[in-house]
Image (tube, coloured by chain):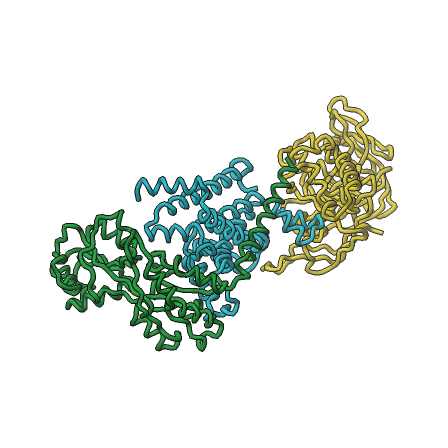
Amino acid sequence: MNREAFLEAVRLLLALDRELVAITFNSLRFALASTAIAAVISTPLGVLIAFREFAGKRLLVSAMHTLMGLPTVVVGLLVFSLLSRSGPLGGLGLMFSPSAVVIGQSVLALPIVLSLVYSGLSRLDPELRETLVTLGASPVQRTTKILREGRIAVASAILTAFGRVVGEVGTAMMLGGNIRWYTRTITTAIALETQKGAFALSVALGVVLLLVAFGVNFGLNYLIRFRGGTA
Amino acid sequence: MSAIRIQELTFSYADSQSRQALLEIPHLAISHGTISVLTGDNGCGKTTLLKLLAGLLIPSSGTIDTAAGPPVLVHQRPYLFAESVRANVAWPLKIRGVKRDELRERVDRALAQVGLTRFALRWALSLSGGEKQRVAIARALVLKPEVLLLDEPTSNIDVASVRTVERVLRMLAGDGTTVVMSTHNEASAYRLADELIPLAAGRPAPLRVNVLQGTLLDPGVNHIGRFRVTTGAEMFCPAATGSFTHAVVRMEDVILSQHEMDSSAQNHLPGTVQAVATADDELVRVDLDCDFPLSALVTHRSVEELSIAPGVRLYATFKASAVRLY
Amino acid sequence: MKKVQRTMITGFWVLLAGSMAWATGTGERQEVERLVLATTTSTENSGLLEELLPPFEEEYGVVVDVIAVGTGQALEIGRSGDADVLMVHAPALEAEFVAEGYGVERVYFMYNDFVVLGPTSDPAGVRDARDASGAFGAIAEAQAPFISRGDNSGTHVKELSMWSAAGEADVAGAGPWYREVGQGMGAVITLANEQQAYTLADRGTFLAYQGDIDLEIVHQGDPELFNPYGIIAVDPQRHPHVKVELAQALVDYVTSAPGQAIVDEYRIAGEQLFFPAVE
């Protein structure tokens, strides 16, 4: 790692090197897609769990929080065993494709969104649900309204999940195979380039990732500071 | 035809261990366009009954018939949405797909009814307790409910707002809405109620006060004032200034005698017995007509000794200080 | 404020939906046929494939997806049927793979070599060794620091066979001078440089790092250090879905004259790395 590599990295960034851009696009679109899937599934589910009492709720909440911290390679391994040709879903032929990466990252993101949405919403007054019922709202209308009331928490949850997913390497590597142009993301590319000793591209990619992370954090801070904690 | 009729209602929570039901009401009928006030200590079942009426809880047994559409409940500390007042009030209509013009008109009307027209664009969560209560009422009114339920509407708000809310409720009842509310604020209860429904331990409790509507005739001299009941009869009450519309005398403060007594009490009112009914093991309730309905609680022995029966003429005596003005 | 917010929110959802569609590969890649090649990281890192594959891709109108992992993992991917063709350099393991019925045939098509790297001072006197096993023997005797891949890669397998040849089969427990790190070639070279230790590396990776490190080649050229590459099409009897014709076409291509020529002509820093094996 030396001055030349660093200068070369700057050149790549400023020139918007084609491969650099392609890799960044991959990272962003996989992360966006998987965060979206996780959000669509987890936000209504979070509403359900936050506003209802049921047997085993405490256990479920515990499980959710634990799953949040799943190591990415564990998720990668799990999904790999499902999607591999010799696995139960092998017939779909999804291994080493963008779809596989998105599936794996969705699995990563799901408990994060679910857990944070649940936490955020459970800080809302439990009377909210009763109020909505008494005003005659249907279950869908109630869920939508509750999510709107807890919108800061929901947005923070999604942003947090995105941040985690865009910076992970274990799942993307195992499920995507780091195929050039196709499934290579910022993180898998950094892993590869560093190993090759090609530090210029690594550094450039690292800068991009830092910028993305910075953006995510900025967004989160804005939400929390200027739009009020949880609601 | 009652607005609400309850028959043999009982309620317990599903996981309740106790063998006694939380709420047990054999019969209750509420008429259209009246204000019924549930009174009683905390935990007596007022909120539970309101939730049952609202359909938020299912009775364990018995029936609740509401002649008109579903009642709308306004909670004690109402949950307002993180939006403008207007948006809060408009929401129940929005989810029903009400068209923009009709929506705007109904929202404006509801806001006017509660006196919050000027507040339409304010952030709902930034309002005072009383103002929030009114927003919640407007939000319920916008649905034009035939029955409006309110849990402690005046219990947690500033004094000025209490009067405003009471005025709104009276106006609504005047327009034909049936209002059922709970309160532990005695003053509100007496001021508002067309029908007082006391509850104790989840069961209807007997009414033990006389509530009389009228006006304070004369603020009083020598600590004694005069209160005129709507029928025209007058009674002596504590001296007071202000506008009072209700006089309350506890039934057990009324003494009955066959002849007019010389006593330190200021009120001696002749009347005719209308009804005599056993109140409990000790006491009997005697309803008199003294140009206005007045009831007294006396012992069984007194009933025998004075031969109290319908038609008998008696004197009702009570101190001026036994009268509470609201 | 409301309108801007609304536009932003709609824009966000459009972006989301768009990226979801895009992410799940509704792009041009879907229409082109894919052939999945599992190979080792050192092979991919050498850059040879970027010269070797394009003519094949063009002629057949396909795209070869290169999955670069460790040798063991590449073979496992072949076993599970997630790849159509393998390219590794571990003859014993490759033979096993075919014998177990996972591969059609192992075709030897090129070789590169390993070199022994060490500090310029050469404390173990490796430069004086007559052959590769002598070199390893010298290191063991001097108990000079040695970094091992320790990851069952082709390099690691070769390294272990050299220890055996030098009469030091039990090297794993030999002492703190022998360090197994379980990492890729690049990381191992970097580590060895930091610790000024000896190591066994493939020439390709060494050439890539040459400018950045202080280690030198202290022994090379012994045929024992040759590193033969085999290409194996995954057997359709095991995994009926594999693209066996295309895989076979790739095998034929790398062993053909033009394929072999590319191998022969490939240079890193002006030095030849791979040597064609087909006559």
Q: How many marks?
A: 0
Image quadrant in which you'd find residue B255: top right
Residue C52: x %, y % from top left: 39, 60
Which sits in the foreground, B42 or B283? B42
Identify the colour of chain B in the image.
yellow
Q: Judge left or right: residue C162 versus residue A39.
A: left
- The residue that appears at 61% across and 43% down in the rendered structure is C9
Chain colored green: C
Residue C68 screen position, x and y as percent: 38, 60
Task: Give the position of the C terminus of chain C as an image quadrant.
Answer: bottom left
In front here: C186 or B248?
C186
Q: Which corner quadrant holds the N terminus of chain C?
A: top right
Q: Visible in this render: residue A170?
A: yes
Residue C59, placed above or below residue B314 = below
Whether residue B153 is situated above or below residue C78 in the rendered picture: above
Query: Is residue B138 rendered to the left or right of residue C48?
Result: right
Q: Position of residue A214 (x, y in %)?
A: 45, 40
Question: Which lettered chain is shown in cyan?
Answer: A
Q: Is residue A198 left or right of residue C142?
A: right
